[in-house]
Image: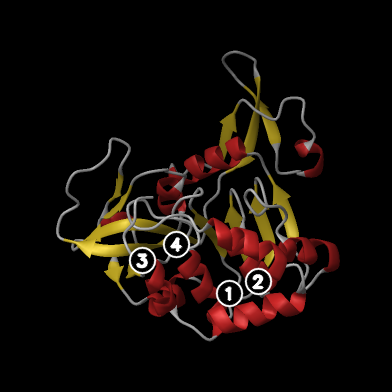
Amino acid sequence: MAQFLELAAAVEDIVKDGDSVAMEGFTHLIPFAAGHEVIRQGRKGLTLIRMTPDLIYDQMIGMGCADKLVFSWGGNPGVGSTHRIRDAVENQWPCPLALEEHSHAAMANAYEAGAANLPFAVFRGYIGVDLPKVNPRIKSVTCPYTGEVLATVPAIRPDAGIIHALRADREGNVLIEGIIGCQKEVVLASTKSLAIVEEIVDDFGPRSPNAVILPSWTISAIAVVPGGAHPSYAQGYYKRDNSFYIAWDKLSRERDSFLAWMKENVLEKGPEAFAKYAKRAAA
């Protein structure tokens, strides 16, 4: 059952050095506050897993948290490259970074397989493409019923799954609605899971048709960090900060400016720094 913890205590319990860690959220509800706490706690040797490793993984990799990235697309959405990830791959700074690249479909299926406690995912994909030539973990299987050759990838079963959600109730159930990525599958596939939420409520109230409620028994810990998804957005709470994504392109290009920003805005500040983004606004 979910425990309600402060963010620092939750991350200390959920994420250990050398763990495989999946932090999901697709444009919406990206767990920036959680990633910053991992950085502050100095975690090392992580295998970071994410369909779209954008700014939060750029920051974590640039601070030396990871030695491997499992992903299906990487970049600063709508802007350009993730310069810290690129520096790690090309120049091994601040440490070498191994890559395991998949398609979006493969990772979605791999999370599903992990959530179902299956050893691998099977799907139609990787036809006429080159990724299987560079990723030996992509294999194929012949259907015993039709003879069709299908793609396979290993199930993703992280040591730690971390998401940002909208609300939790007092029993520890967690609500996500709006653009839904693969947060549900990550929580179900992970050995331990952490949900960061905007607020605790007595009742979720009216919900949209695509709402997902994760029962308390699926969550290891819940931490309340209003604004904790900034610069991504939380539907009904705050909008996406497009200006931040544009500014990041410039300040992250050089190591010195990157490190100075991280020192001032992450290492020397706690989760309370996100509170200024928590004012409700139409998203």
From the viewer's perspective, is 260 left or right of 92? left
Residue 183 appears at what percent x and percent y?
A: 43, 49
Percent from the top left, x then y, of residue 171?
A: 19, 61
Q: Earlier in the sequence, mark 2 or mark 1?
A: 1
Which residue is identified by label 2?
Answer: 45
Q: Nearer the viewer, mark 4 or mark 1?
A: 4
> From mark 2 to mark 1, how far is it between C-alphas?
6 Å
110 or 102, nearer to the observer: 102
Q: Quadrant of the N terminus?
A: bottom left
Secondary structure of residue under mark 4: loop
Name the N-terminal-most of marks 3 and 2. Answer: 2
Comparing marks 3 and 2, which lies closer to the viewer?
A: 3
Q: Nearer the viewer, residue 176 or 243?
A: 243
Tell me the CA gap for discs 3 and 1: 31 Å
Image x and y of residue 53, in percent = 62, 55
> Disc 4 versus disc 1: distance between alpha carbons?
24 Å
**Residue 122, percent from left and from top:** 58, 31
Residue 180 occupies which quadrant of the picture?
A: top left
Residue tagged by mark 1? 17
> Label 2 crowding class (10 Å Cα cut-off): few <14, some 14-19, many 20+?
some
Label 2 near label 4: C-beta < 8 Å? no
> Residue placed at 42% from the left, 72% from the top?
274
Sequence-earlier tag: 3 or 1: 1
- The residue depicted at 35 percent of the width and 68 percent of the height is 226
| Residue type marked 4 | Ala
Label placed on residue 229 = 4
Q: Are marks 2 and 1 in contact (CB under 8 Å)?
A: yes
